[in-house]
Amino acid sequence: MKKQDSLYMQVYDYYRGLIESGKMHNGEKIPSIRYSSAQLGVSKTTIEQAYMCLCDDGYLVPRKQSGYYVSRRAEQKKSDSGKSTQVVKNRIVYDFASSGVDSESFDLSLWRRYVKSALRQTERLLSYGEPQGESELREEIALFARQNRNCVCDSSNIIIGAGVQSLLHILCPLISERKSIAFSDPDYIQGVTVFSDHGFKISKTFSTADIIYTSPSRKTRWGETLSVSERFKLAEYAASSNKLIIEDDYGSEFRYVNKPTPSLQGLSGGENTVYLGTFSKLLLPSIRISYMILPPELNEKYREVAPVYNQTVSKADQIALCSFIRDGHLSAQIRKSRKLYLQKSKILCDLLTENFEDKVTIDKTDSPLFVKASFKTDISLSLLLNKCEKEGLAIIPISGKTGKTEIAFSVSAISTEKMEKGVQLLKKFF
């Protein structure tokens, strides 16, 4: 398994290097999967997995029955992912801005046992996987989505893919008659990239768009959510104005309340809404397994073209995840992760109060992954961010006014030890 991961990452790094160095340009077609397989001496599955990761990260865009092409946003990706940015990233020591996961939140040894068990199913692994995803896994996901997110679905309208972007590449041709899309988070560069490369106009407001892309369980970077009443209003507005909703439900399991707010997809009765879910935050970001629930009219269109798409998630990983969910470990993982992040949020709140005393006010967020705080200070937000960057401290800026600065802190990836040292460093800037 590790060898396979190493191979596809080598292919990924090879082509990313060509793009970032300017040796491959915007609109240029890269070698076919078959040709690259022969040229690099690795399997077609490995090449395809690498290509899909490049698509997910905005370097490539697939074109139906044509191949893969360098994205026209590759130039922007090159500047965002170039050497200077990498140097800054490498200097981050106290990361209160990361969306990663805590190493203690997931039992990797348990996952390895399920992967090893899947790899022993020789007969199943000798054939290609189902384009839509393994039926057993889709059934488990449907049950999970119905019970935990009130989704209206069954295994027939669920599609599995290696990350949300790979699923969006499948979705875009199905909704090509709609010409424009608006994002609730315009900084979601991965989504903007996909839709731009498929020819959609990016609108600034919902009223001027044919498609509404929203993450109601993460309305802001610091975890605020749309209330049930706000979700009902959005669903009613979309239905009355014939707008399609794409609900990216990333992070919905991490709320202070035990039961997450109902999904837009469920509130709309499964109509006029495409639901996107992922296991990256619940398990590990490197386990790239996501799923999409299509409404009936789009599911019919998908069935017509499904045979031309290849499944981007390895069959072994799908078998492993299916057994993992079926044995109750996913539910246990949600409880374990929520408890861990609740504990870390409390520790951070205590550290801020201890170090800043009456100069800080802790504002409750909807998610245990984040802590939001207001500081009494005369330092400008831009100067504070500059000081933080120089000292390797990453935070989430919210607003800066005379005498008051608002900051959010993510506790998802930073260790408790670094959390304490990071707060002490932050105190020196005020």
Image (spheres, rainbow, N blue to C red):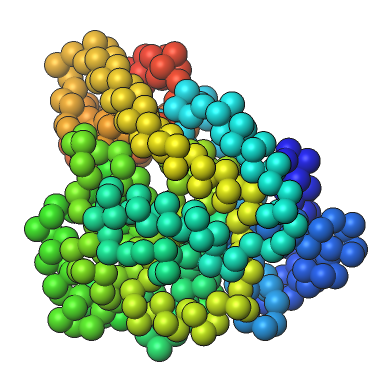
Q: Quadrant location of residue 59?
A: bottom right
Q: Is residue 361 above or below residue 239?
A: above
Question: Left or right: where does residue 336 sit relative to residue 313?
Answer: left
Residue 227: x, y in percent?
14, 52
Residue 155: x, y in percent?
42, 63
Outermost residue on the front side: it is: 123
Q: Can see residue 123? A: yes
Q: Is residue 4 above or below residue 306?
A: above
* Residue at horizontal 36 percent and vertical 27 percent from the top: 336
Look at the image and tell me in which quarter the C terminus lies.
Answer: top left
Residue 280: x, y in percent?
48, 45
* Residue at horizontal 50 percent and vertical 55 percent from the top: 136
Which one is nearer the viewer's eye here, 350 or 81? Answer: 350
Q: Is residue 199 above or below residue 20?
A: below
Question: Left or right: where does residue 56 sit relative to residue 153?
Answer: right
Look at the image and tell me in which quarter the N terminus lies.
Answer: top right
* Residue at horizontal 33 percent and vertical 74 percent from the top: 295
Residue 17: x, y in percent?
75, 54
Which one is nearer the viewer's eye here, 123 or 131? Answer: 123
Outermost residue on the left side: it is: 229
Q: Can see residue 183? A: no
Instruction: Please give the count of numbered marks on the rendered protein.
Output: 0
Outermost residue on the bottom side: it is: 177
* Residue at horizontal 69 percent and vertical 82 percent from the top: 66
